[in-house]
Image (tube, rainbow, N blue to C red):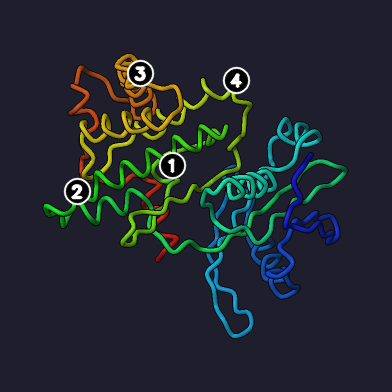
Amino acid sequence: MALASKYQIRREGDWKLLVLPARWNADLWQQIREILSSESPAHHPRVKRFRFLQANQEEELYLKTYYCLDILERMRSLFRASKALRALKQGEALQREGFRTPLAIAAGEQRKHRLLQKAFLLTVEIDGTSLPAFLKDRFQSADVGWFREKRTYLRQLAAEVARLHERGFVHGDLTPYNIMLRTDSAGAAFFFLDNDRTRRYPSWLGHRLWKRNLVQLNRFQLPGIRLHDRIRFLRQYLTNRAGSQNDRRLIAWLERRTRRRRAWKDRLRGELSFRELMKWDGRLSKKEKKVQSWSS
């Protein structure tokens, strides 16, 4: 039996909306429509950060807009919901299981003759830092205490990813740039972003798909993260997975897949050692620069 959702369905012209009733009003919808009308369509989602004043309180919101420009994609939309609505529903499913995701205020999709035109997801800003930015900041001012904290955070992240997979979820793009964290005296709280391609699978099927998430996490060079940190993360992950063992074959497999992914994605060739291959080169990725530009 499907669980009751906290979101309500609204209709606004050719828009179908799922909204949090307590956070939704006509003024917010008007501001969203103005943003949507001012943007030009693009093949990749557009993200707009804006401020909204409600009840004398201003908050930061993020509007992610998806455009459906490909004819094949439009035909597929006849049989499935938009990425925006899927992201909202997957975020809600993750929250029910105790995972942290950005709070979604609303999602909407615009259709004509049942064909998807565009869609949006509206979320509240997270009081946290992207994982690469956090590592870069701490790595530059590293001291003895930082190395102890790093081991603690690695254990906590490994346990959270293991729990994600134990509950049947496979994230669509589990890169370090889609993880944010907030720290306090108890450690780190991790948030999973961009859940439009996250899926929940039966236990008998998902056990093969979670390996893809490990490759997505592992292929990036990160400040302060060395080879032994990657091995420590993987072993902690396996320790937290029911029935898993510290398997050297998995470590070797992950190295091969990471090398293949780096060679294809970053056009790397040669016989670098894995330690050298994954050593941080001091540069931010394009995605991290984009994240920083949203925050400026």
Residue at which label 3 appears: 250
From mark 2 to mark 4, how far is it between C-alphas? 37 Å
Do the residues under discs 4 and 3 have CB atoms within 8 angstroms?
no
For residue 254, which numbered disc appears in the image? none
Quadrant location, the C terminus? bottom left
Residue at which label 2 appears: 148
Q: Circle 1 sits in a helix, a strand or a loop, which is it?
A: helix
Q: Circle 2 sits in a helix, a strand or a loop, which is it?
A: helix
User: Around disc 1, counting alpha carbons within 10 Å, would you say few (fewer than 14), some (14 to 19), or many (20 or more)?
Assistant: some
Q: Which of 81 and 159 is in front in this view?
A: 159
Specify the amino acid type for callout 2.
Arg
Q: Which residue lies at the image location 18% right of the left edge and 28% below the top edge?
A: 276
Task: Report the mark closest to the observer, 4 or 3.
Answer: 4
Q: Earlier in the sequence, mark 3 or mark 2?
A: 2
From mark 3 to mark 1, how far is it between C-alphas? 19 Å
Q: In which quarter of the image is residue 154?
A: top left
Outermost residue toward the left?
144
Outermost residue toward the bottom?
56
Q: Position of residue 134 (x, y in %)?
A: 30, 54
Residue at which label 1 appears: 160
Residue at which label 4 appears: 204
Would residue 90 be found to the left or right of residue 134 on screen?
A: right
Q: Which residue lies at the image location 38% right of the left edge and 35% below the top edge?
A: 217
